[in-house]
């Protein structure tokens, strides 16, 4: 599992869900659908109908990949920080039982409120 205390996700920008489906095809359940996907330079975060999948690409070649599956049912608390006038980036923090805090930073232009609504629909 990704050590979320030490890993730093580069600013995540929207990613084509079709590419996310291709990347995660071996992990997705038959009835699981990709809802939103975001990608940094190499790492990505995908929100499905059942969970959040964080992908940390490791090593120089990028062949080593760590997929962390974070089920919505284990979210205890979540927080969004929307972009402001001077700080154009936004962030999402999720607290999972047994894992702790997971933080994702998004590039300017990402509607973090929509992500917050998606999390609320799955958690509340």
Image (cartoon, rainbow, N blue to C red):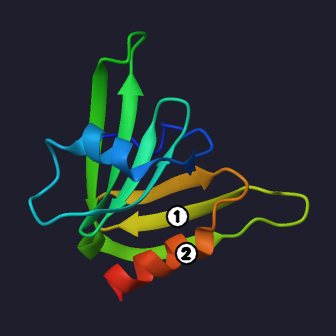
| Image location of residue 96, percent across then percent down | 34, 66
Q: Quadrant of the C terminus?
A: bottom left
Residue 93: mark in rendering: 1
Q: Is residue 28 left or right of residue 38?
A: left
Q: Is residue 111 visible?
A: yes
| Image location of residue 52, percent across then percent down | 33, 59
| Image location of residue 69, percent across then percent down | 25, 53
Of callouts 1 and 2, the N-terminal one: 1
Q: Is residue 17 left or right of residue 38?
A: left
Residue 44: mark in rendering: none
Does 67 appear above or below 91?
A: above
Most foreground residue, 24 or 81: 24
| Image location of residue 57, percent across then percent down | 39, 28
Q: Is residue 122 left or right of residue 95?
A: left
Q: Is residue 54 visible?
A: no
Q: Is residue 35 left or right of residue 74?
A: right
Toward the left, the furthest residue is: 30
Residue wearing tag 2 = 114
Does 15 appear above or below 71?
A: above
Residue at the spot x=29%, y=28% of the render?
65
Between the C-alphas of marks 1 and 2, the distance is 14 Å
């Amino acid at each position: 599992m990704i050590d979320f205390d030490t890993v730093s996700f580069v600013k995540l920008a929207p990613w084509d869900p079709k590419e996310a489906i291709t990347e995660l095809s071996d992990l997705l359940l038959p009835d699981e659908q990709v809802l939103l996907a975001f990608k940094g330079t190499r790492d990505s975060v995908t929100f499905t109908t059942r969970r959040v999948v964080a992908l940390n690409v490791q090593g120089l070649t990028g062949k080593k990949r760590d997929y962390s599956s974070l089920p919505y049912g284990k979210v205890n608390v979540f927080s969004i920080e929307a972009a402001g006038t001077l700080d154009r980036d936004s962030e999402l923090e999720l607290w999972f039982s047994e894992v702790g805090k997971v933080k994702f930073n998004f590039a300017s232009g990402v509607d973090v409120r929509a992500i917050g609504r998606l999390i609320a629909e799955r958690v509340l």
